[in-house]
Amino acid sequence: MTLTMTREAATKGGGSPRSHRPLITKRNIPYLLILPALLGFVAFKAYPILAALYISLTTGAGAARTFVGLDNYVRLVNDPLFWTALWNTALILVVQVPIMLLLALVLALGLNSPLLRLRGLWRLGVFMPSLTGLVAYGVMFSVILSKDSGLLNWVLGIFGVDAIDWLGSPFWARIAIVIALTWHYTGYNAVIYLAGLQSIPKELYEAAMVDGAGAVRRFWSITVPQLRPILLLTVVLSTIGTLQLFDEPFVITGGGPDNSTLTISLYLYENGFRYFDFGYAAAIAYALTLIVAGFGLLQLKLTGGKK
Amino acid sequence: MKGWALTFVLAAVFALCVGPFYWLAMAATHANSEIFAETPKFYPGDQLGANTAKLEESIGLVHVLGNTLFVAVVQTSIAIVVALLAGYAFAKFEFRGRNAFFVLLLSTLVIPGGVTIIPIFEMMNDLDLIDSFPALILPNLTVPFGIFLMRQSLLAIPDELLDAARVDGAGELRVLWRVVVPVMRPVLAALGVFLFLGAWNDFLWPLIALRTPEMFTLPVALATLQAQARTDFGQVMVGTAISSLPMMILFLVLQKQFISGLLAGATKG
C-alpha cells in the first residue's frame, strides 16, 4: 500500500521538470491532430501500395517468396484471359458510363423543371436504388433476371418480347450487368446534377432571357458551362469505379458465361484469393492502377479541367 | 398540360427505380416455389415468418446483423473523429509537410482498392487477425475522402471565430469541441451517413478477411447463401430486404444531410 503510493507520487512528481509543460502546445497541436490519420495512412495505404509493387515482382508467399523480376508482367501480357477481362471491362465502360450519365442529366433537368409536380417524391425514388448494398441488389437482380420467372422478362412479355436468357448467353449477360449498373447509379448522379443545377445563379438565366436567348441556347451557354466541373467529376468517378468493377459480376453472373463478364478486378480476386497466386494478382492490380491513372490523366487533359 | 406530361415521365422513372423494391418486399413474403412461379407476385403472401425463421437457422440472422452493426458503428465513429482531427489540422494550422501529406493522401483516391488488398491480407495474417473484427475495421479508419471533406468545410469557418475562443483562454481541444463541432454538425452527419453506408455494404474485404460463419457480416452471409446450390430464395429475399432497410430509414430521416454530403464531395472536387 505504502509502496504503491510512493511509486505513484514518484511518477506524478515525476521527477522531470518537463511534466509541468502542458501535453498539448501550440507548436505540436497540428502534429497531434494529424497523427491518427498519418498512422492509418502509412500502415494501410502507403505501405501496402509499395509492398504490392514488390509482391508483383515475386512468386510464392511467406518464406517461399522469390524475386522473379518482371516475370508476372510478361505472363500478364501473354495471358489471353487478362485481355478478355480488360476487353469486357472496357466494353462495359464504354457502353454503360455515357448512357448512365446522359440519362442522369436528362433526369436532373426534368427534376429541376418548375413545371414538375411532387418533386420531392420523385427525387426520393430516383435516389433509392443507390442506397441498396451491392450484394443486396446483386442478389435481387440475379432473381429479377432469371429467364423463366424473372420480373424483367415478365414485364418485357407484356410488350410481346420473348423471354431473354439474361444470364445464360454471353451477349445478354453483359447487357444485364449494364442494366444493373445503370439502375443502381443513375439516380445518384442525377441527384448530384440536380444540386449542381440548383446552385446556378438564376440571374444568369434571367439576363439571357432578356437578351432573347432560347431554351436550347440557354442550356448550351449557361447550364453546360456552369455544370462543367460536376460533369467532369462524375465522368472521372464513374470511369474509375467501372474500371474496378467487381461486386456486380461476382454476385450476378460470377464472371460468366464463358468469361463474358469477367472483369479485371474479378480476375485479380480469382488469382489472389482462389488460387493464392499473390505475385500474379499484385501484377494485375498494378496493371489496373496504370490503366486507372492513365484514364484519369487523359480525362483531365482532354477536358482541361483544373484539380 | 406540359407539366403533367413531365410528371408522368418522372412517375414512370420512379416506378422503374422503386418497382424492384416493391417486388422484393413481396417476394420476401412468399415461398421459394411461388417466387419462381410464372407470374411475379405483386401481393403479400404469408411466408414472411417462415422465411425469416429459415434465414435465422441458415445464417444466424440476428447474430450476423449484430456483427454488421457493430463493425459499421465502430468503424464509422472512429473514422469520423480521425477525419475531423486531420481536417482541422489541414484547414487551420501551418505545419511542416502539410501540403505534401495532403497531396499524397488525395493521390491514393485514384489507386484501386485491389492494390492494397493483398499486402493488407498478408499483414493481417502475420498479426493473426484474420477472421476478426479488427481486421475489418483497422484498414478503414483513415478515409482520404472524409479528411478532404472535413478540410473543405473547415476552411469555410472564419479564423476569427476560433481566435475569439482562444482569447477567452480555451485550449485547442476545447475550441475544437465547443466551437468547431457545433458548426460542423451537418457535415459530420453527412460524412457519418456516407461512411456507415459504405461499412454496412462493404463486401470484398470482409469476404476475404472473414472465415467462420459466426464472424460474417450480412453481405458476406447473403452472398454465401446465394451461392449455395438449391438455395431457398424466400429467405434470401428476406435477407436482402433487411440489408436494404437501415439505409432507407436513414435516408428518409436524414435526406438533407445525405444530399449535402453528396454535394460536398462532388462540387468541391
Image (tube, grey):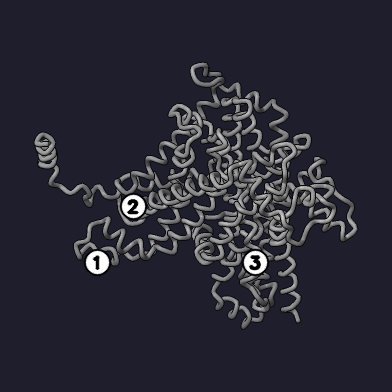
Q: Amino acid at mark 1?
A: Ala
Q: Are marks 3 and 2 on the same chain?
A: no
Q: Amino acid at mark 3?
A: Ala
Q: Check disc 3: other Cα within 10 Å, few if <14, some if 14-19, many if 20+.
A: many
Mark 3 falls within which chain? A
- Between A211 and A236, the one lying in front of the other is A236
B237 over B257 or under it: above or below: above
Same subunit, labels 1 and 2: the answer reads yes
Quadrant housing the N terminus of chain B: bottom right
Locate residue B220: give its quadrant: top right
Percent x, y of residue B143 = 46, 47
Task: Identify the residue position indicated by label 3 in the image.
Answer: A108
Question: In the depicted view, which residue is nearer to us: A12 or B44?
Answer: B44
Q: Are marks 3 and 2 in contact (CB under 8 Å)?
A: no
Chain name for mark 2: B
Mark 2 = which residue? B89
- Percent of width and height locating residue A195: 57, 67
Q: Nearer the viewer, residue A223 or B227?
A: B227
- Residue A262 is drawn in which quadrant? top right
Report the residue at 75% width, 35% height from top: A259
Circle 2 crowding by C-alpha within 10 Å: few under 14, some 14–19, many from 20? many
Q: Are tags 1 and 3 found on a single chain?
A: no
Which residue lies under the disc numbered 1?
B164
Residue type at mark 2? Ala
Q: Chain under label 1?
A: B
Disc 1 versus disc 3: distance between alpha carbons? 43 Å
> Mark 1 packing: few (<14 Cα in 10 Å), some, or many (20+)?
few
Q: Quadrant of residue B189?
A: bottom left
Residues tagged 1 and 2 counted as in contact (Cβ below 8 A): no
Secondary structure beneath dot 3 equals: helix
On screen, residue A47 versus residue A201, left or right, reads left
Residue shown at 55%/27% (left/top)? A56
